[in-house]
Image (cartoon, coloured by chain):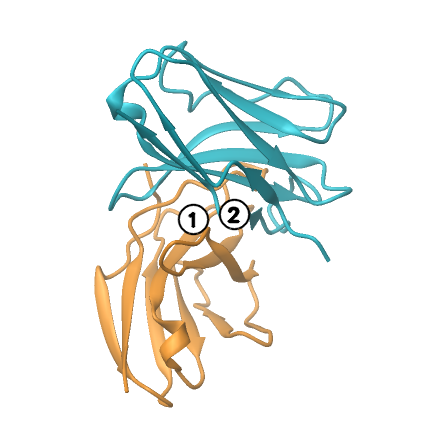
Amino acid sequence: DAKTTQPNSMESNEEEPVHLPCNHSTISGTDYIHWYRQLPSQGPEYVIHGLTSNVNNRMASLAIAEDRKSSTLILHRATLRDAAVYYCILTWGATNKLIFGTGTLLAVQP
Amino acid sequence: GAGVSQSPSNKVTEKGKDVELRCDPISGHTALYWYRQSLGQGLEFLIYFQGNSAPDKSGLPSDRFSAERTGGSVSTLTIQRTQQEDSAVYLCASSPGDRGNSPLHFGNGTRLTVT
């Protein structure tokens, strides 16, 4: 079973920031938090991952709660190309085997 | 550089036939995964290879499904006696390691249609 909870869908306006939440209350100490996104008719694309500290890369930022029971993916300036399903996933055991949930469908309005 | 390559991109087969789906991972990646995604559904884990270790086959839905990885590189997923419920997009991913901090790189999948 997926160990994360995400809203089914969210909407954003173009050029505005987007905060995608994820709850993972049963996270263990060795679980990494990964985010992937899937655009229509494509395979999933890696976005970002973290363990305890907040992370930034060219695509997004990941804010991790101090107790690690939740995290937020931040897209700083949404574009139409960011419309996708976003998956928040905890790594399984000590490996990077990913068990996908249903994700959040992000719609971006012009 | 080259990403994960899957072939064919589309495959239509008749019920009862066998099919083989191919995955070429990124060079040097030791871990390889197969997933499938039925229409409008999430991704379902099938099988995982890491180096020379025994594969994790815990996600294979039936004994009609099998996979091999030759020489630690190319992988083939075989479905015998295909059924209509096997229709899905089959996705392959590779990663440079199998620890929790190694991201997966996915191909664009093979769309299998069983008629």
Mark 2–mark 1 CB contact (< 8 Å): yes
If the image is split into quadrants, where does the N terminus of chain A sit?
top left
Spatial CA distance of label 2 from label 1 is 6 Å
* Residue at image location 70% in from the left, 53% down from the top: B2
| The hue in which chain B appears in the rendered picture of the protein | cyan
* Residue at image location 72% in from the left, 28% down from the top: B51
**Residue indicated by mark 1:** A27
In this orientation, which residue lies closer to the viewer: B5 or B64? Answer: B5
- Where residue A49 sits in the image (x, y, percent)? 55, 60
Structural crowding at the residue carrying mark 2, measured as other residues with C-alpha within 10 Å and reported as few (<14), some (14–19) or many (≥20): many
- Where residue B30 sits in the image (x, y, percent)? 72, 36
* Residue at image location 49% in from the left, 48% down from the top: B108
- Where residue A39 sits in the image (x, y, percent)? 39, 61
Dot 2 amino acid type: Asp
In this orientation, which residue lies closer to the viewer: A49 or A44? Answer: A44
Q: Does residue A83 sit above or below B35 in this rendering?
A: below
Structural crowding at the residue carrying mark 1, measured as other residues with C-alpha within 10 Å and reported as few (<14), some (14–19) or many (≥20): some
Q: Is residue B113 left or right of residue B19?
A: left
Dot 1 amino acid type: Ile
**Residue indicated by mark 2:** A31
Report how many numbered discs are placed on residues in the image: 2
| The hue in which chain A appears in the rendered picture of the protein | orange
| Chain letter behind tag 2 | A
